[in-house]
Every structure is written in structure tokens, then in C-alpha cells.
Image: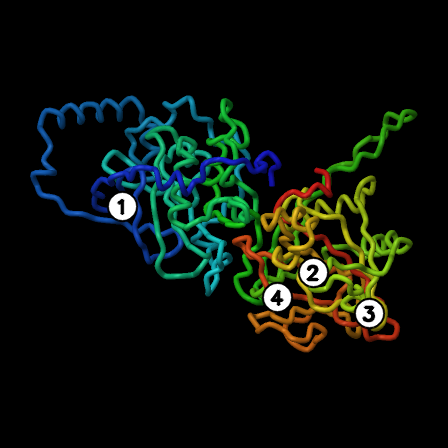
Amino acid sequence: IHPALIRAPRPIQSLKTMAAKKKPVKPKVATKGGGGGATVMAKKVSSNGNGNGSNSSSSSSNANAVPLLPTVIMAAIAFLGGVLTPPSLHVARSVGVDPARNVSSNNAMPAASSFALPSYLPCSSHLDEYLHNAPVPGLHVICVEPVYLDDNGKASAYPPSSDMSRVLSEANTLRFTFYKGSHASPIRRRIKIAGSKNGGIASISWQEVSVKFVEELGLASTGPKQQPWAAFTATGERIAGEIDDLVRGDVTKVGSNAHIMTTIGASGMIVIAQGGNWRWPGVRAGFRRTVELAPPPPRNLGDDKDDDSQPSVEAPREARNVTIQTLSLQPLVLSIEGFLTDSECDYIANKASPSMKYSSVSLKDADVGKAASNWRTSQSAFLSADNDPILREIEHRTQSLTRVPRSHQEYVQVLRYGKGEKYDAHHDYFDPAAYQSDRNTLQLIQFGKKNRFATVFWYLTDVHDGGHTVFPRAGGLPPVHDHTDCTRGLKVQPQKGKVIIFYSLDAAGTLDPLSLHGACPVLGEEDVKWAANKWIWNAPMGYVRE
């Protein structure tokens, strides 16, 4: 996630308002086989993810008649072009594109090679890793296909094996297929959006594209209780958002129109999150995906004044892969084994041990005056990663796992549960309706716009008897009456080094009541449950410095 693409919200005219004010473009009649039209043309399709379907229309012979003199002139030009530029013809034929165009005539647009291109995940082979059997509110999948649209509206696609940098330079149109709610529905919408004829994908307007996203997906504008929506690559890299400022002047910079459209065009598939933060599509219970975790920044080892042969910064480390397994879709609960090493688990517990105190809770209006022990009997301590390279590295790893910036994280909370100790079922989010008398909490959450988005829960020890994390409403079960009940719903057994991610807000940014969870009592005589968690907010909070 590139920090340069993360902007602080500012009051501007919403894209939905812009879409309403924008005059509709009257489409041209599509020509046979091309599925073309004007700059933007939409249609319903029922083919597979990439969808190379076409529109056709009939026209009279008079409409197709071509005057003789222009035909002769065009034939002569074509002949001279074939004599003078055979290499260009060869390249164009290899991708099935109009050979008469000059793809390098627009010097204002940067080459695709100016940017680091994202991983290419075409819908033809990866769509089933992102779609769900039922709609997921606020989470949308869009298949992206670069094509060349000629003057007659005929669209020419590129083979999957084509060089992406060349495709992005030659293509002048993006074909989008929408899966609203990331739903595996047989009916979906498709549109084309074009740039300048010879300007490449970088010449397409992000503003125009974002307006169409709002129209097609029904995206809500940022407001008093709504974070701005954002677009991501299929691997969770943030591309741009509703209210991001475009970098102007230098089109080769990250955040420029050219960078945004080049990234979208090279992705093959993008994901739109109404709530503005990435969350891994769960797909179905039991689904597994392997993701890459970026290596942490090299540690500063300090300057050795007496020995110049010693490096002051450690050598860069390699990225590593982990497997994410979906435990539940309602609420979304994900499990990752081996996220922490045994030595890291021991280090965290040992560092927190001297500071452990019996835990407190944020009391709702209805519970003011009651003791925290009515619900929670564990001990806890908060640890800052400042001047701690091990904790800082784990913060970076957590950021890479969730694809949410470190600036959204709270300090790590370390927890200790002895025999019989527990935490009754509760929510990690702050419901504004339950804190109307607590001005400090209301200001912290900006009266509902900010909130805890996800919890990354780390298991630091094995527990053989009890100590499960329970989700009593998993699968959409009805509300609970006994918050101490550990017999219903999803139960996750502690396993040293494993982490789970569960989301307190849905993909639209709305409070998810199904995220109710608790810590079941530890039952074993010799068992002690050590755990820790990172609360991640839906906006920067200032606890952790980038």
C-alpha cells in the first residue's frame, strides 16, 4: 500500500453529485462484431469473467456505401504504409489490432514502463477466488480488459500472453465487467471507457472512470458517518479513492492520472470497497488463499565509528508467503497459522509480564458504575513498538497481512487468562447509540465516522482445555441472551503462533452485529492463555507513527 495514495479527507463535491450533473453521452450504433460505441457504452452480459461478447446491428446497403475517390486515396496510403513500415504491421497483426495507428504519437503520456506494474490476475483464471454465492454489501469486483477501439467502434482484444507494457501503450480503451456485491451472478454489467486514440491507457480519465463506478455500483459518497470508498488491486494494493487529490504536473509520479489508470489497466481485476479499507474476500467457509507478506524495512543497526566494515543497516530480507483460511463469512473470520514465530510469542509475553493489570472495559451508558469484572477477568497491558525493532517488525507484518496502513493500528494489547478467567461476548466497535453520555468516546469515533474496523488476534501459547475464542452469532445466528454461553457458534482453539482476523465493520463500513465474540474460560489446571491483539481502525488514529 503506497503511502502517497492515502489522503486525508477533504470536503469536495461528491462523485455521485458529479455523475448526476454530467450530461449523458449519446452512444454511437455498435458495429457488427465489435461491441463498440461512444466513449462509454454499457450492456448486460451473461458470459464468463473476461467476457468478449459483442453487440451487433444491421444497417442498409446505402449506409455502407463508400465513395470511390476516397477509397482509392485510402488504398494508396495503405500501400505506402505497408512498404514503409512493415515492422509496425507485423506487431499490429500479432495482437489483432488496427495496423494504421501510430501508438507513439502522443508524447504527453508516459510509457507503462515508467511505473511498477501490479500483479496481473485476469478474471479468466482468478474470478472464482473473489466471488461469493450471496452478495456481500459494499464489496465489488470489476474485471478489467484493455482493448483497442477503432474509428468504427470495433474493439480488438489482446491475447493473455501479450507483453503488458506494450498493451497499455497501444490500447486506448478499458472494458469493465461489474460484479456488484462480489456476487457470482450470471447477469452483470459491462461498459467501455476510452481515452485518446493513440494515447494509451494512461490517457483515460480517472475522473470519468470513477463517476461510472459510482453509477454502476451505487457507491455512497463520503459523509458524516461514511468513509470515502477506494479501489484496490486484486492483491489489496490501494490504487485510488473517492476524494484523493490527483498528482498534477508530472504524469510519471505515483498518484497521477496516468499512474492510476496504468495500474487499473494492468491489474486484470480490481476490487472496490465502499468502506474505503481492504478486506480479503472470504468466498466460502474453508476457502484458502496464499498471499505474500512484504519484508519489513531493514533495521538500523547504528553506526560503528571504530569499524567501517560493519554495515549500519541490515541486509534486506525476502518476502514470505502465508495461507489465509476462511473460518466464517458471517462475520468474516480468517485464520493464518505460523504468522508469529515461537520466539516472537515468548518475547511479547515476557515483555508485557511486569506491566500486566486486571483489564478494564469501556462502559456503555447502561453499564456505568458496574465493575469490569462483571464481564472480564483477564489481565492486560499495552505495548508500544517505539524503539522496539521486534514489535515494529510485527506491526509491519500485520500491515502487510491486512493491507491496512500501520497508521490505523492501536498499540498492541497483551492478554493473560489463568484458570477460570474469561471475557464475555462483546463487540470491539463503539456503537454511537450506546455511548450518548460519553462525550470522549463520541469524539474519538467522530460520532460514528471512525471506528474499529478489524481485530488481528495473536495466540501466544497453546491451550489444551478451554480458552477458545467464540463467535456466538457466526453463520447469522440470532441475538444471544446469555453472553457467557460458549456452546454455540464458531469456536477457535488457541494455537501458538496462529492469528485470526475478524472484522467489526462490513465492507460497506457499517457496524456488523454478527462480530460479537468472547473469550471462553480457561479450564485446564496447568493452562495459561497468553494472547495479544491489534485493533485496526477505518482511518488513521495517531497511535502508531509511520
Q: Single out the mark in the foreground, 2 or 3.
A: 2
The answer to whether the residue labelled 2 contacts the one labelled 4, judged by CB atoms less than 8 Å apart, is no
Q: Nearer the viewer, mark 1 or mark 3?
A: 3
Q: Earlier in the sequence, mark 2 or mark 3?
A: 2
Instruction: Determine the CA span between mark 2 and mark 4.
Output: 30 Å
Q: Is residue 57 visible?
A: yes
The image shows residue 169, relative to residue 106, as above or below, that is below
Q: CA distance from mark 1 to mark 4?
A: 42 Å
Q: Position of residue 437 (x, y in %)?
A: 68, 55
Choose between 431 and 194: the one closer to the eye.
431
Image disc number at residue 505: none
Quarter of the image for the C terminus: give it: top right
- Residue 421 is marked as 3
Residue 208 x, y percent position in the rendering: 39, 37
**Mark sitting earlier along the chain (1/3):** 1
Given this view, does label 2 or label 4 mark the residue nearer the observer? 2
Rounded to the nearest angstrom, the CA distance separating label 3 from label 4 is 25 Å
Q: Nearer the viewer, mark 1 or mark 4?
A: 4
Tell me the residue that label 1 is attached to.
35
Instruction: Write down the residue under mark 4.
Output: 327
Q: Of circles 3 and 4, which is in front?
A: 3
In space, the residues marked 2 and 1 are separated at their CA atoms by: 58 Å
Q: Which residue is mark 2?
A: 364
Residue drawn at (34%, 30%) of the image: 196
Task: Report the residue that reaches farthest toward the left.
Answer: 62
Q: Of the residues under marks 1 and 4, which one precedes in the sequence?
A: 1
Q: Is residue 482 above or below residue 428?
A: below
**Residue appearing at x 76%, y 36% in the figure:** 315
> Which element is circle 4 on?
strand
Local crowd size for mark 1, using a 10 Å CA cut-off: few (<14), some (14–19), many (≥20): many
Q: Residue 368: horizontal and vertical position, in percent?
A: 74, 61
